[in-house]
Image (cartoon, rainbow, N blue to C red):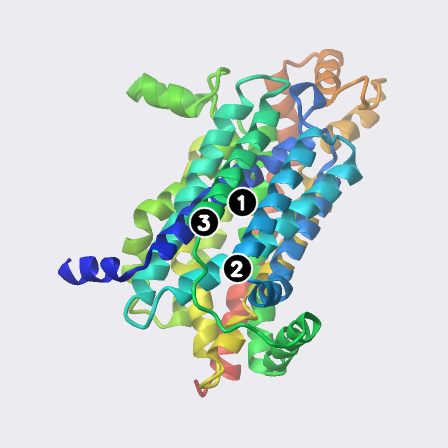
């Protein structure tokens, strides 16, 4: 404990300033991102936008993939122009993007505004990571990055919780409060960077900006010429494709198929206050509150899980984590029982804690001596590709296999019922109400009928299979391709 407190005292003020900004940025990002799939696809009479699942998947997949690709360029720009200036620009772009998203309702204008947000986030990402790196040394880096990772998850936990409460405040304007929350968090960061952020010592680049960017891209290309690294990164696309279903697809699946009122009632019997704290006015629990359990568990258990897997070989820890992830993601989609859902998210979080931190560590270990940093710079590539493919699965695939609206349209066509198409004048909710009326079902009975008839849970086979395929790929890779390491 004495050594820990001694190390803590060694961190300069800018280290804590950077961590504070990271927390508010994660509140802003995850506060919206965890509920974004619902905002894009829910019925317009709830204040949401009513887009299709395919449109949602396309937007979220492309924009988030770009966000993870851009830091190779934005990091070079920050090194050239200066961290403080870039942070001011980043927060300004970021906040204005959220403001535009809160008012735009047409698909391509929302898409463009979200892309603008991604540019702001991409400017922010490398600067904060570089600040943490430059304010730690060999003695303090382990604890320093541990604190940073904990702060990331604290922000990722607080944001969705506040967003959930805000969006349920008012049926039509609650969504706008979610955007305002993110904007406020970013404005706070803007004030912090102006008033308190002192740029750490850095080597100022004397080359032209375009040459700096070319050098960064050339370094990535050089690293990727190592076939061992390239194959490993390609395999890990599968992990991120499966992992991201938690944010892209699960919110819609819970919202469409799972009645969480039974879970609310069970909590209410134990603690009415806790049920009220977690639940909505409708006496159920919102999807984002359930998904947020993942971040909460990481905050509580990451150190314990890391201690357990510390003795494992890195690749074995990753493989074990992905197997647990695959089981967890399968359970969350396999039934419409909210208690299995909770259990699945818990298992998923354990897998994430075992595998995610070991991913970058493994990239460093397979790097030739002296090229660790160069190889680490490639670790964002499978994350970007994974987000892109997640968008496809969460969009087109989910819409065809599991989307409640799409399945109801098939049933209506087979029965020959005449119901107006969903439009600005006839909302998604009205469409369901009219279908239930003509089919002589209650809302709950209609949902159960579609579940029993069309088996939307079958999508879990795809998500879990991707995880298992990733594990098989890693086993083959470690045994035959990396056998000498």
Mark 2 crowdedness (10 Å alpha carbons): few <14, some 14-19, many ≥20: many
For the residues marked 1 and 3, what is the alpha-carbon distance in whole angstroms? Answer: 22 Å
Front-most of 335 and 426? Answer: 426
For the residues marked 2 and 1, what is the alpha-carbon distance in whole angstroms? Answer: 33 Å
Q: Which residue is mark 3?
A: 22
Front-most of 234 and 167? Answer: 167
x and y percentages locating residue 177 in the rendered image: 57, 26
x and y percentages locating residue 80 in the rendered image: 59, 67
Which-is-in-front pick, marks 2 and 1?
2
User: Vertically, is 4 above or below 479?
Assistant: above
Examine the image and state in which quarter residue 81 appears. Answer: bottom right
User: Vertically, is 208 above or below 162?
Assistant: below
Mark 1 crowdedness (10 Å alpha carbons): few <14, some 14-19, many ≥20: some
Examine the image and state in which quarter residue 2 appears. Answer: bottom left
Q: Is residue 325 left or right of residue 225?
A: left
x and y percentages locating residue 143 in the rendered image: 30, 61
User: Vertically, is 91 above or below 13?
Assistant: above
Q: Residue at x 62, y 74 (%)?
A: 216
x and y percentages locating residue 86 in the rendered image: 58, 56
Q: Which residue is mark 2?
A: 83
User: Vertically, is 377 above or below 48?
Assistant: below
Give whichever of discs 2 and 1 has the lower sequence position: 2
Which-is-in-front pick, marks 2 and 3?
2
Q: Quadrant of the N terminus?
A: bottom left
Q: Residue at x 47, y 70 (%)?
A: 202
Give whichever of discs 2 and 3 has the lower sequence position: 3
Front-most of 314 and 92? Answer: 92
Q: Which residue is mark 1?
A: 246
* Labelled pair 1, 3 in contact (Cβ < 8 Å): no
């Amino acid at each position: 404990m004495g050594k820990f407190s001694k190390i803590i005292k060694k961190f300069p003020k800018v280290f804590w300033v950077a961590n504070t900004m990271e927390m508010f940025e994660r509140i802003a990002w995850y506060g919206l991102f965890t509920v974004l799939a619902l905002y894009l696809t829910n019925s317009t009479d709830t204040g949401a936008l009513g887009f299709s699942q395919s449109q949602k998947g396309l937007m979220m997949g492309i924009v988030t993939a770009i966000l993870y690709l851009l830091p190779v360029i934005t990091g070079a720009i920050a090194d050239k122009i200066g961290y403080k200036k870039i942070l001011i620009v980043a927060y300004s772009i970021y906040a204005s993007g959220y403001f535009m998203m809160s008012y735009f309702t047409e698909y391509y204008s929302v898409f463009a505004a979200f892309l603008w947000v991604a540019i702001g986030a991409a400017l922010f990402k490398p600067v904060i990571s570089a600040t943490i790196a430059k304010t730690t040394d060999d003695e303090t880096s382990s604890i320093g990055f541990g604190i940073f990772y904990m702060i990331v998850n604290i922000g990722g936990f607080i944001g969705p919780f506040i967003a959930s409460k805000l969006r349920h405040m008012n049926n039509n304007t609650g969504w706008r409060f979610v955007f305002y929350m993110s904007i406020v968090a970013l404005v706070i960061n803007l004030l912090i960077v102006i008033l308190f952020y002192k740029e750490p010592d850095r080597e100022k680049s004397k080359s032209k900006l375009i040459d700096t960017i070319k050098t960064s891209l050339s370094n990535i290309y050089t690293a990727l010429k190592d076939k061992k690294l390239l194959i490993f990164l390609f395999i890990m696309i599968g992990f991120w494709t499966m992992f991201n279903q938690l944010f892209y697809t699960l919110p819609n699946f819970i919202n469409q198929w799972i009645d969480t009122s039974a879970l609310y009632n069970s909590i209410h019997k134990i603690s009415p206050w806790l049920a009220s704290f977690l639940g909505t006015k409708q006496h159920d629990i919102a999807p984002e509150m359930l998904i947020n359990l993942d971040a909460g568990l990481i905050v509580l258990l990451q150190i314990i899980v890391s201690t357990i897997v510390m003795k494992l070989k890195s690749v074995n820890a990753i493989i074990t984590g992905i197997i647990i992830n695959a089981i967890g993601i399968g359970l969350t989609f396999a039934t419409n029982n909210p208690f299995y859902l909770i259990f699945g998210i818990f298992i998923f979080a354990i897998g994430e804690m075992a595998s995610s931190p070991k991913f970058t560590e493994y990239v460093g270990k397979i790097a030739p001596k002296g090229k660790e940093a160069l190889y680490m710079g490639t670790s964002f590539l499978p994350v970007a590709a994974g987000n892109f493919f997640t968008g496809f699965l969460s969009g087109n695939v989910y819409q065809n296999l599991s989307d409640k609206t799409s399945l109801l349209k098939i049933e209506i066509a087979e029965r020959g019922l005449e119901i107006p198409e969903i439009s600005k004048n006839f909302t998604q909710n009205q469409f369901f109400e009219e279908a239930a009326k003509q089919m002589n079902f209650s809302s709950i009975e209609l949902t159960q009928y579609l579940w029993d008839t069309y088996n939307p849970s079958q999508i879990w086979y795809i998500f879990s299979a991707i995880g298992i395929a990733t594990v098989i790929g890693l086993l083959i890779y470690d045994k035959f391709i990396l056998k000498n390491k």
